Structure formats: C-alpha cells, structure tokens
Image: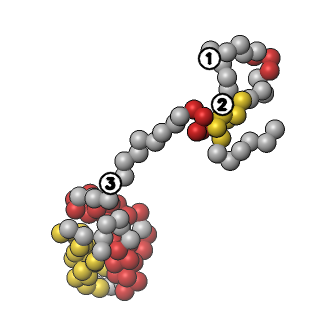
Amino acid sequence: MHKPSSSIESDVRDGLDWDPMLDDERIFIQASDVGLSDEIVISGESSSTDVDDRIRKAFRRNAILDGSRIEVSGSGNIIYLDGTTSSWAAMEEAVETAGEAPGVTEVVNRLVVRP
C-alpha cells in the first residue's frame, strides 16, 4: 500500500471494530483530515547566561580544548573569551566554537597561548 508523504500511520483500535488477527492492517490518515495543529513556539532570544553555559559545555566536550583555562562571559550577543590555551589551534577552536553558539554575533578573543 502506498502511503502519501504527508500522512500519519496509525493503528485503529479505539472507537472502531478492530481484529487483533489483522494486526498488519493499517489506516492512513491525511494530517489535514484530522485537524492537527502545531503549538510550537520558537523564541529567538536566549539569555546571556544560557549562551555562556552552552559555550562552556561545548568547550568541555572538545578534546582540543583540554588543558585550556577559558572564562566565558557575555553581554547581549557578544561573547568575551579570557584565559589561556595550550596552543594556537586550541585558541582558534575556542573562538570558532563560541562563534557558532546560537545568538552570538561577535566573539572578543582575549585568550593567551601558553604551551
């Protein structure tokens, strides 16, 4: 049986006669026929603290930044990186990682490389 791409596959068990012996029988219902609506609210605003925390967590997951001591602070959409890294590659990785965080428009790099 061909299922349209905009359909939902569902077992019919409630409100209709259902034969458990025919468990492979399915009914395809168009989402528009059911009256589904999405109630998803997307907010483009993140608090500065939330963004700072996300960046710190990303730093902890990144092996290149192991051994670095980086302080993350923010003001609006600007992130400030202070501290030390063990290599130029680690410093570049920190700046790139911070810049990829949602809502960040600028990264001020005040890191010092200390091998």
64 on left or right of 20: left
Residue positioned 72% across, 15% down in the render: 18
Whether pointer 2 and pointer 3 mark residues with C-beta atoms closer than 8 Å, the reply is: no
Render colour scheme: secondary structure
Q: Earlier in the sequence, mark 1 or mark 3?
A: 1
Q: Is residue 32 above or below residue 58?
A: above
**Marking on residue 43:** 3
13 on left or right of 92: right
Considering the numbered disc 3 on the image, is that residue within a helix, a strand or a loop?
A: loop
Q: From the image, which quarter does the C terminus lie in?
A: bottom left
Q: Is residue 36 above or below residue 72?
A: above
Would you say residue 30 is visible in this rendering? yes
23 on left or right of 49: right
Residue positioned 29% across, 85% down in the render: 113
User: Crowdedness of circle 3 by 10 Å Cα count: few (<14), some, many (20+)?
Assistant: few
Tell me where residue 80 sits by quadrant.
bottom left
Residue annotated with mark 1: 14
**Marking on residue 10:** 2
Residue 34: give x, y in percent of width and height: 57, 32
As shown in the figure, which amino acid type bears the numbered disc 1?
A: Asp
Q: From the image, which quarter does the N terminus lie in?
A: top right
Q: Alpha carbon of mark 2 to alpha carbon of mark 3: how far?
A: 32 Å
Q: Nearer the viewer, residue 76 or 111?
A: 76
Tell me where residue 100 sits by quadrant.
bottom left
Tell me where residue 68 sits by quadrant.
bottom left
Residue 75: give x, y in percent of width and height: 18, 69
As shown in the figure, which amino acid type bears the numbered disc 3?
A: Ser
Q: Alpha carbon of mark 2 to alpha carbon of mark 1: how far?
A: 11 Å
Residue 16: give x, y in percent of width and height: 67, 15
Considering the numbered disc 1 on the image, is that residue within a helix, a strand or a loop?
A: loop
Q: Alpha carbon of mark 1 to alpha carbon of mark 3: how far?
A: 37 Å
